[in-house]
Amino acid sequence: MNPFVKFLASPAGRVVRAVAGIVLIAWGLLGLGGTTGIIVAVIGIVPLAAGLFDFCVFAPLFGAPLSGQKIRSSK
């Protein structure tokens, strides 16, 4: 299992993804504004949802399952 994917599936990785999503949403809506800001905010929903709902969008690129729980249970 790729160490990057293992980190993202860990509790610390979930927090990092959720915080990154919040930062992207805030930056898009408060910092950038306009159409570009809305696009960045919408993109920020993906890591926020991934952290909250425990899935990893990068895992399938490395041959791992999408579910964080399945990643953590595999050795």
Image: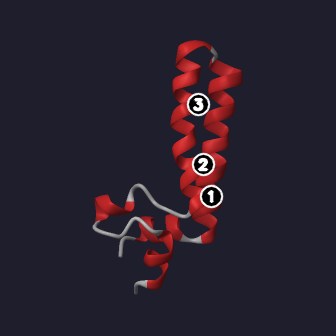
Q: Amino acid at mark 3?
A: Ala
Residue contact between numbered discs 2 and 1, judged by CB atoms under 8 Å: yes
Q: Residue furthest top?
A: 34
Picture residue at 66% right of the left edge, 29% below the top: 27
Q: Is residue 5 left or right of residue 49?
A: left
Q: Label for residue 48?
A: 2
Mark 2 nearby-residue class (10 Å; few <14, some 14–19, many ≥20)? many
**Residue 28 percent across, percent down from the top left:** 62, 26
Could you tell me the amino acid type at mark 1?
Answer: Leu
- For label 3, the residue is 41
Which residue was labeled with disc 1? 52
The N terminus, quarter of image: bottom left
Q: Left of 44 or right of it: where is 60?
A: left
Distance (Cα) linking label 3 and label 1: 16 Å
Name the N-terminal-most of marks 3 and 1.
3
On the image, which quarter does residue 75 sit in?
bottom left
